[in-house]
């Protein structure tokens, strides 16, 4: 009722709030033949017509085949530079294909540029500050992603937003496959840096200039917190830079977004690195075993075979390597080499001990053989008296015989005691083996401690320009996607 009351004075006076110069030819024909009953209908219809987006389209003749808006850059003078503001947000890291050296991500892009042919006053169109038109109605910058290897199969956004001041906005979400050079030298404690670069295909800086108006001091922490990642990776940082490059003889500006990823290493540490360290500890503990038995050699061989099995497992979990040898491979080779060297030293020490024991057995056997030969020779002497002889001299000989037998028994006892003392005393080769074993044990433990300390300082590192404070994904806003 209030709206009708406002309209009646205009109807009675034959006037309208709209600009009469903006009426099209059909409206003029219609109003020229209006009657008193049609005055309200005509002016009321004109008011609605000016408040719709159709009138803006007709005012600027926005259509599909209008060369003014679709063929060239939207400038009044071709010397004018078209500035294109680019922003990109990453919503998800879908996959990191290490075999193909590719990053699959879901991104949203926002482009904004000025169309010098379009401008209107919102007050003349019922406060309409912007409208949406199909992308085929206007020129769009020929931007592409430099690292993109495969186009998104989904259809791009089909609408453009035109503001009353001439700025045109374009938003689109797409899944992009981009090439990324992966360096797995520090696997599984590695950082990966992947770029997504926007640039023009045909225009130089003199025609099309790309800019990024987002505050460079912004930490992107809010964006990083919302990025969904795969179970094996997390996003550490997102930075944007502007670079000027020379392509085919003319300069172009490109906007480079650098995504820093860090691998979740907990699974690899628990399933591979720690078992290798346990094998090293077992090999060190085996140095305490006795050298006389064969259990020590068998134990070391078992550990060596276990490390060999771990190397086969590493071959399955290790991504395709670059030109550099990964630290984890060097770690496995070092452990295998040290255990092999320990096994060889154990075999050599065992050989020296067996050689010393063989010499002792041969020496003891020769002594017993000499004692038996002397006693048999005394019994076979013809001048030695017999027991059944009644000669008084024979009795003396018999007494002498008993004394000789007792001396013989005493000699045997002394010989046995001396042999036992010599058996308990280590031989020359046993002493050499003991020295080798002690020196190798000290050198082995010292080498292991120093190597692990120095090696892990180089292997497990924090990048000087990237800080990932959350070693474990605990953020409730950050979700993982299982691929």
Image (spheres, helix red, strand yellow):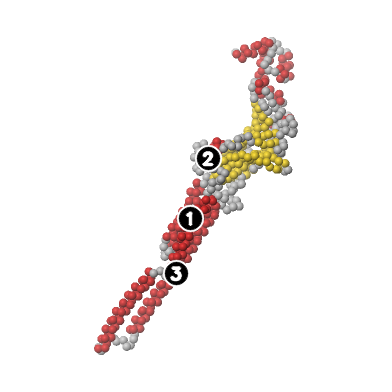
Say above or below: 440 vs 53: below
For image coordinates 66% across by 39% down, the residue present is 254
Secondary structure category for the residue under label 3: helix
Q: Is residue 445 visible?
A: yes
For image coordinates 67% across by 34% down, the residue present is 84
Q: What is the quadrant of residue 390 in the picture? A: bottom left
Nearer the camera: disc 3 or disc 2: 3
Identify the residue under disc 1. Answer: 449
Q: What is the quadrant of residue 433 in the picture? A: bottom left
Residue 413 is left or right of residue 311, and the answer is left
Q: Quadrant of the N terminus?
A: top right
Mark 2 or mark 1, which has the lower sequence index?
A: 1
Q: What is the quadrant of residue 148 in the picture? A: top right
Residue 261 is left or right of residue 394, and the answer is right
Distance CA(mark 3)–CA(mark 2): 64 Å
Distance CA(mark 1)–CA(mark 3): 30 Å
User: In x, y percent, where is residue 266?
Assistant: 50, 46
Identify the residue under disc 3. Answer: 429
Query: Local crowd at mark 3 within 10 Å, few (<14), some, or many (≥20)?
Result: some
Distance CA(mark 2)–CA(mark 1): 37 Å
Mark 3 or mark 2, which has the lower sequence index?
A: 3
Mark 1 or mark 3, which has the lower sequence index?
A: 3
For image coordinates 44% across by 59% down, the residue present is 286
């Amino acid at each position: 009722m209030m709206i009708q009351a406002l309209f009646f004075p205009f109807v009675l006076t034959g006037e309208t709030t709209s600009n009469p110069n903006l009426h099209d030819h059909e409206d003029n024909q219609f109003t020229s033949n209006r009657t008193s009953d049609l005055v309200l209908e005509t002016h009321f219809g004109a008011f609605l017509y000016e408040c719709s987006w159709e009138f803006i389209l007709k005012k600027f003749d926005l259509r599909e085949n209008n060369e003014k808006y679709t063929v060239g850059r939207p400038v009044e003078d071709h010397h004018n530079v078209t500035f294109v503001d680019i922003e990109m947000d990453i919503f998800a890291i879908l996959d990191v294909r290490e075999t193909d050296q590719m990053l699959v991500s879901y991104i949203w892009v926002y482009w904004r540029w000025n169309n010098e042919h379009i401008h209107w006053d919102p007050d003349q169109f019922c406060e309409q500050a912007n409208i949406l038109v199909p992308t085929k109605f206007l020129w769009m910058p020929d931007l592409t992603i430099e690292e993109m290897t495969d186009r998104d199969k989904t259809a791009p956004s089909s609408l453009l937003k035109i503001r009353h001041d001439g700025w045109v906005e374009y938003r689109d979400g797409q899944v992009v496959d981009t090439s990324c050079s992966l360096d797995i030298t520090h696997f599984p404690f590695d950082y990966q840096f992947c770029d997504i670069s926007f640039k023009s295909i045909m225009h130089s800086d003199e025609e099309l200039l790309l800019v990024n108006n987002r505050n460079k001091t912004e930490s992107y922490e809010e964006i990083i917190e919302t990025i969904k990642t795969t179970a094996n990776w997390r996003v550490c940082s997102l930075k944007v830079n502007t670079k000027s490059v020379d392509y085919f003889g003319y300069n172009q500006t490109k906007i480079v977004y650098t995504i820093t990823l860090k691998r979740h290493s907990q699974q690899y540490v628990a399933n591979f690195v720690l078992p290798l360290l346990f094998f090293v500890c077992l090999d060190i503990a085996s140095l305490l075993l006795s050298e006389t038995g064969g259990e020590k050699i068998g134990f070391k061989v078992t550990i060596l075979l276990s490390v060999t099995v771990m190397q086969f497992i590493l071959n399955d979990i290790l991504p395709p390597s670059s030109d550099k040898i990964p630290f984890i491979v060097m770690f496995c080779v070092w452990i295998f080499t040290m255990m092999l060297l320990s096994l060889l030293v154990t075999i050599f020490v065992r050989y020296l001990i067996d050689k010393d024991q063989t010499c002792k057995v041969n020496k003891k056997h020769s002594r017993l053989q000499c004692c038996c030969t002397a006693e048999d020779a005394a019994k076979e002497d013809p001048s030695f008296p017999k027991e059944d002889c009644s000669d008084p001299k024979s009795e003396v000989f018999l007494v002498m015989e008993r004394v000789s037998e007792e001396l013989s028994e005493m000699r045997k006892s002394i010989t046995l005691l001396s042999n036992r003392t010599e058996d308990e005393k280590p031989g020359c080769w046993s002493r050499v083996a003991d020295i080798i074993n002690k020196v190798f044990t000290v050198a082995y433990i010292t080498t292991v401690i120093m190597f692990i300390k120095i090696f892990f300082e180089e292997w497990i590192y924090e990048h000087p320009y990237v800080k990932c404070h959350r070693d474990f994904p605990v953020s409730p806003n950050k979700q993982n996607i299982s691929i």
